[in-house]
Image (cartoon, helix red, strand yellow):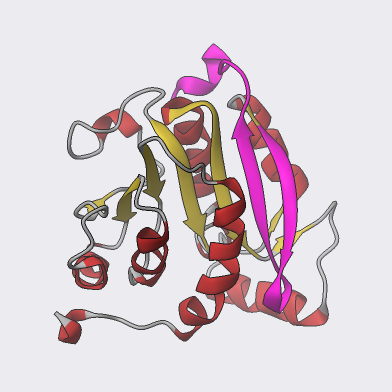
Amino acid sequence: MAAKKLIYPAADRNKEPILSVLHQYIRRGSEQRLLEISSGSGQHVAHFAPYFPQVTFYPSECEPHLLESIAAHAHGLSNVAEPVHIDITTDYRTWPGDIFRENSFDYIYSANLMHIAPFRCSEGLFRNAGQILKSDGILFTYGPYAVSGKLWPESNVRFDQNLKSQNPEWGVRDIEDLKKLAAMNGIQLFETIEMPANNKTLIWQKTSKIPTHSNVF
């Protein structure tokens, strides 16, 4: 299995700080479910799962070639399901398997997706989260973010410029824009946690019934 594993240095660096945040919000005791969107290499889910035996982790990825690496990292972990191919811009009812249902997940976790993807992926993330999260369920997002039109430090500004030079649809997202998406889907920003390397973990919570007009993909 080891030969199939991809290793991303950044994932190794940030997995422990992110784990410390998850410890603050994932409940002990009862059985729970967490969907990971854009699992990448699979390093994160493999690192997190042993610390939360009460949680079944469902990794997913839009890039089919990464599914093998995710499975290799999670090999032998009894509370990690087989990774599935998910395009977050599509309706959850079209996703593979029969586990994706309204109000069926306690948590959704997504790291480093928003800035290396078109904005429609952020839209899809909040639309689907608003549907499949349970009431008071939590969406964790991690990465660099602008705040009220301001991006800092200079390293993040250069990073944003580099992303946009590769693809004009990419770029660091502003938290204010994301809050608007969240509100359309019955979700609100609960807490912003500063992380190493000028990143943030945003804690979002499903708080209300979703407006009917936002349910259309």
Q: Position of residue 133 (x, y in %)?
A: 46, 31
Q: Locate residue 95, reporting x and y percent.
A: 25, 38
Q: Residue at x 53, y 68 (%)?
A: 167
Residue at image location 47% in from the left, 86% down from the top? 9
**43 w.r.t. 23: above or below:** below
Q: Residue at x 51, y 81 (%)?
A: 10
Is any atom of residue 72 visible in this view? Answer: yes
Frontmost residue, 202 versus 183: 202
Instruction: Return the residue nearer the eye: 25 or 91.
Output: 25
x and y, in percent, of residue 103 in the image: 41, 23
The magenta stretch is 188-217
- In the rendered image, the quadrant that contains the C terminus is top left
187 left or right, relative to 7: right
- Quarter of the image where the N terminus is located: bottom left
Q: Is residue 140 above or below residue 99?
A: below
Is 206 covered by the magenta stretch? yes
- Residue at 49 percent across and 42 percent down: it is 125
